[in-house]
Image (cartoon, rainbow, N blue to C red):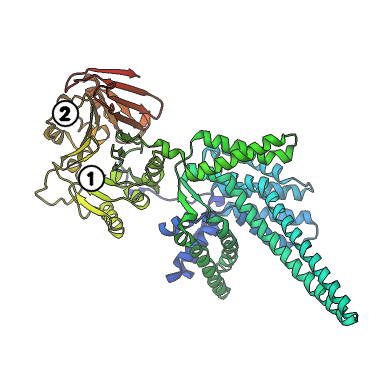
Amino acid sequence: MYKSALLVSVEPGPWWHELPAAVRRYVRRTTTERFGGVRARSGAIVRAILIGDREGLDAATTERLIAAGTYHVIAISGGNVALVTLVVVLCLRRLLRPPRLVAAAALGAVAAYGWTVEIEPSLVRAVVTAAVWLSAEAIGVRAPPMRTFSLAILVIVGADPLMVIRPGAWLSFGATLGILLCAGRLAAWVADAARAGDRGQSEGEEDATEGGGGATQGTRGGSAGDTVRTTGAPWHTRWRQLVRSAAAVGAATVAAELVLMPVGAATFSRVSLAGLPLNFIAIPAMAVVQGAGALALVPEPFGWLSGPGVLVAHVAATVLVDSARLVDWLPWLAWRVAPPPGVVLVAYYAALAVVLAGPLVGGVPRRAERGARIVLVVMVLAVATGPLTALARPPRGTLRVTFLDVGQGDAVVVQLPGRQVLLVDAGAVIEGFDAGERIVAPALWALGVSKVDWVVVTHADADHIGGVAAIVKEFGVREVWEGVPVAHAPLRAALRREVDQRDIVWRELRRGDRWYSGDAVVEVLHPPEPDWERPRVRNDDSVVIRIRHGPLDLLLTGDVGQAVEDALPLAGDAGAVRILKAAHHGSRTSTGPGLLARYRPWTAIVSAGRNNTFGHPAPEVLDRLTEADVLVLRTDRDGAVMVESRLPPSPSASSPLVTMRTWRGRRWDVAVMPGARTGEVTATVSGS
């Protein structure tokens, strides 16, 4: 039954929902009006810092801030809450004499601020931590920072247990923990060094003064010495204050980086050192944007006050964003890495815990602490350089094909025997989640791939082409290949613009195209030369590729239907181990009985999303595969599937071996007997 939209009415929610929503709407409307035109980007920065609304930020700005390690300043977190608390305390300290009343008022202001802005893990952590601390101050209890932080975590996780699995929560909690554990010690080391330098300089000045006084033997020499000491002391005082402030910011940045570097590498496949110097600019700029941005929101009839606020906020936001261009000038300050393996993460944090906890708890043997420091340095290098990725590359002469789990989409990495890399499709971009950036790229780094030679776009559907742009940006792609072009397809047009900007070769594949890499041959079976222009993307125009290497024969079928499958030219000797990538994610319109009878696969791999709305793979397809005695692997259940083919070094050596394993730990080893030919299952299979 369907109802007319005229019968649907929108009712207002409760006031505790409507009031903060109204405040956010006012901020969005006012910043759009007052930061319009050339200042639109600055208005988006102001909205992000004031209310956590980052929808107005363009992708280039977001990517630049992430690469520079300063994206955290536009995510509402401890800095924003601390600034609100500081302003309230400074304003009320003279009005409310008892400090407890000031703390209570600040608690109310922090609660109101947290209630108004967009909810995110860093904000929840900061507000709860501030609330715990201010509550303790209001009742006259001095709570140690670590105890306050621990109580805040208990409150947050108790209210939302799923918070512990969110990367945003890991980053927020980890940064705070690192600052609490490390920043004080790091700042103290810098301050001690500064004081030692001051003492040495003061002693030198005193020696010089005494010498000058002795030489003159009069009051003039003494006055000069007094003048030196009088004018020098304030300068040294200001210098020490500056060093302490810089040490505090630097120590907080280094401390947070120590804790978060492995998490960032594992989550975002990125290590950035640019944040170490840039935070000295970004953090003050964020504070200025927050203060001036709030002034820019002053309503009428006092709107004239907003002019200076808009100007100052615009300048500060520009400084904040443009400072991140440092990574464009010095690209070695930020680089991509493979997600570190679990053993590296465990060793890293175990060593870090020993190094940090040793002086706090006492009783840790000096030798153990020294060993932990060595392990920590080694693990830092392991995370930052990814030396294990070199071991992940297949040996020369080995063919490796990895079917990635990208949800409802396709992505196949082909590492050829000649060390070239072919990528077939790269998943989708759905609601801001880019499978190319978040799944395919980390997988490539983990597989030891730093450069992709060729990218094949089987067709321009979103679940195949969506993630390709991210790969083009990161992996120095030499050529991008497609089948039948559809000039007006939006995703294809956007990718073509990106490719042309980077001077990458774009070419069309046709049936009969073939190239070799070592002992492997890659052949295009479809599409033929089109005889009419396509107004839209068609599944049956997908590129179909066949890869053969010794006993292994793989057929990658895109999204073609049964009619195209039945017309595929499968002539020639097929390998003894035939693996089929089921077309169209296991749709009932593909993987027909005709193809199964002609190709006779040993295994079919279905790339589909868990609980997808299309019902893939279709029960009819699974039944057909079962009746044909085909082993079925599914990325939604088995995860990524990796197939390797190795040839013996000489004809007299042991038989060729094909290995297939899944991310969830299933494995098959296939030893092919000499003389195995099409249709002869003369192979020894071990595994399950």
Tag 1 or tag 2, which sits nearer the N-term? 1
Q: Nearer the viewer, residue 544 or 105?
A: 544
Residue assigned mark 1: 459
Q: Nearer the viewer, residue 78 or 679?
A: 679
> Who's the residue at 77% across and 62% down the image?
200
Q: How many marks?
A: 2
Q: Quadrant of the C terminus?
A: top left
Under mark 1, the amino acid is: His
Residue 348: image location, x then y, percent: 57, 38
Question: Which quadrant would residue 649 be assigned to in this image?
Answer: top left
Residue 368: image location, x then y, percent: 67, 34
**Residue 133 shows in this picture:** yes
Q: Is residue 61 left or right of residue 685?
A: right
Residue 571: image location, x then y, percent: 11, 31
Q: Nearer the viewer, residue 177 or 273?
A: 273
Q: Residue furthest right?
A: 218
Q: SS of the residue at dot 2?
A: helix
Under mark 2, the amino acid is: Leu
Q: Is residue 328 left or right of residue 511?
A: right
> Who's the residue at 76% across and 50% down the image?
138
Indicate whether 45 appears above or below 642.
below
Indicate whether 219 appears above or below 268.
below
Residue 336: image location, x then y, percent: 44, 48
Q: Nearer the viewer, residue 212 or 395?
A: 212
- Labels 2 & 1 near each other (Cβ < 8 A): no
Q: Is residue 35 left or right of residue 371?
A: left
Distance CA(mark 2)–CA(mark 1): 21 Å
Q: Which mark is residue 595?
A: 2
Q: SS of the residue at dot 1?
A: loop
**Residue 91 shows in this picture:** no
Q: Residues within 10 Å of mark 2 (few under 14, many from 20)?
A: many
Q: Residue furthest front?
A: 215
